Amino acid sequence: MHLFTLTAVEAAQALQRREISSVQLVRDIYDRIDNVEPQVRGFISLLSREEALAAAENVDRMLKQGVSLSPLAGIPMALKDNICTNGIPTTCASLILKGYRPPYDAHVTTALREAGAILIGKSNMDEFAMGSSTENSAYHLTCNPWDLQRVPGGSSGGSAALVAAGEVFFALGSDTGGSIRQPASFCGVVGLKPTYGLVSRYGLIAFASSLDQIGPLTRDVQDCAYVLEIIAGHDPRDSTSVSREKERYTAYLGKEIKGQRVALPVECFGEGLEKEIKELVMGALAKCTEVGVSVYEASAPSTAYALPAYYLVAPAEASSNLARYDGIQYGLSIRSGSNLLDLYYATRSKGFGAEVKRRIMLGTYALSSGYYDAYYLKALKMRTLIRQEFESIFKDHDFIVTPTSPTVAFKIGEQKDDPLTMYLNDIYTITANLCGFPAISIPCGFVEGMPVGLQVIGRPFDEGRMLQFCYVLESLLGLKGRLAEMKLKEE
Amino acid sequence: MKISRKEVEHVAALARLAFSPEEVELFTRQFNDILDYINKLNEIDLEDVEPTSHVQPLHTVLREDEAVPGDSALLEAVLREAPETENGFFKVPPVID
């Protein structure tokens, strides 16, 4: 049996029982990468086999000495390329950060390093996390392991594809409008965007600071709980990181979900949703009712305005955050002109790709004098209305369930030239970002051989119960930890 | 509200981005499509709604203002990434002609 087919927790348990070694896991993962990475191309940069093996040997030595390690010690994983790694290139898939080596680790990088997880590489993404297909990477495309003609979703498309292809046991992504959940849905893996403030953003290269959250992409719900337990927690270096007691998310797994109440917002099941996807989500919920969950229709009419609000708030924050790329302190710098202004224009125009420029422009416009009240302020008010509607649903329901995406993974190139159609991919996911609520996507079936995701949105900091719910649902659906079947190179 | 080519050029200058005439043309068109969509927000009466700029109850997080000893290795790592430095400073082209 190949070790890469195990879930992270299965591999970790075999490690703790000393049936296998971390070195064996790393070797098996690199063999798998050699086999499938030329087709998938989920990595932007890959650590050398020797570097990863050295880290694995270290974990094996400690296990041998009887040192008590975290449950994920010795497990190979990947980080999205907008998460800073000390001395290892972190590019945000942008030319403006080509070759940039951060002088520090992100909070989550440190947390995983200290837990003994083995970093294998940095995963591909849409440039600065702006996109829904990973086609906006300045470096290369990533293909969906379930069908190489299709996109893996985005912006954490590399992370999702690597997990689905068995090239890593888990990965981290970031989610500003759906960037963990939509690729998780497209690639048939589990993806969680935690409550805003649960995971420190220190060292996450900022896109839209009031919306960004880091979260896990994993093979199943159990793995998700284990990874979340490691990365969640207060960090004084992120002033929006919430100070609250550490929770044991894994303790929720296996408890029954009888009596829980689920709301279905009718607005998320109407026009634009593929019929087969709707049937799969409804079928999954029918299974929940068999174990004592009640399902109710609900209404959140303001969600129809979430997307326009998002496409003002996110670009506005991005235009401000991306003002720092000026060619002076780090990254690309084009110094052919005669003065500072020339340097700015030349560097930024060459360094940013089309979608990033489009959003900087939109955000600059929305914040510019005379338009602030007409656009940005209205979007912030809309944000209040949406949150109020969701809070009122949560008064007497535990969770809100929707499809993660209105379609399955689309063909590469299909939506590339139509920004507005591309934005519609996020229609069910952005609400959670605008409100700061936690939301998770888990696989709920297949349409024409492509995975479909179901989204569960919860109350702030209710990740434990969401994972409990999803753990039961996953087992009812029998879709746990399935990898994409890939044609291998001739051996 | 329609945005003109001239406005696109103005916004580009604010954002320190340069575009070819063809790019300005394309951006103007895409901009108007996106703004048409965003203008959906005008369908709702938002007069008396409080804006949410942030989802958390915001309070300013403060720390003690203590001097931290300099870390020469960190300084070196930071400057290593800089396109041009001189005597431990970032070097920039002339600011005033």
Image (cartoon, coloured by chain):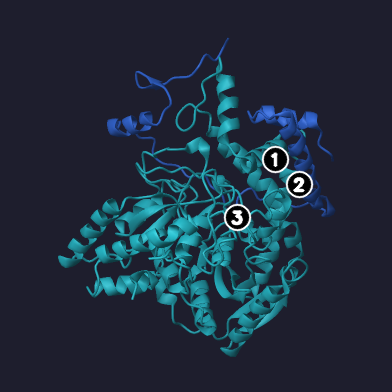
Chain colours: A cyan, B blue
- Do residues under tags 2 and 1 come within 8 Å of each other at their CB atoms? yes
Residue A201 drawn at (x, y percent): 47, 50
- In the image, what residue type sits under mark 2? Ile
Q: Which of these two is toward me, A150 or A199? A: A150
Q: Secondary structure at mark 3?
A: loop
Q: Secondary structure at mark 2?
A: helix
In the displayed structure, does residue A316 sit left or right of residue B26? left
Residue A143 drawn at (x, y percent): 54, 58
Q: Alpha-carbon neighbours of circle 3 within 10 Å: few (<14), some, or many (≥20)?
A: many
Q: Is A19 rendered above or below residue A84?
A: below
Q: Quadrant of the C terminus of chain A?
A: bottom left
Q: Which residue sits furthest front?
A: A490
Q: Gap in Å between the C-alphas at discs 2 and 1? A: 9 Å
Badge 2 and badge 1 both on one subunit = no
Badge 3 and badge 2 both on one subunit = no
Indicate which disc residue A133 carries. 3
Indicate which disc residue B34 carries. 2
Q: Which of these two is toward me, A134 or A294? A: A134
Indicate which disc residue A362 carries. 1
| Quadrant position of residue A90 | top left
In the displayed structure, does residue A301 sit left or right of residue A398? right
Marks 1 and 3, the one that precedes in the sequence: 3
- In the image, what residue type sits under mark 3? Ser
- In the image, what residue type sits under mark 1? Leu
Q: Is residue A381 visible?
A: no
Q: Is residue B43 visible?
A: yes
Q: Is A29 rendered above or below residue A259?
A: above
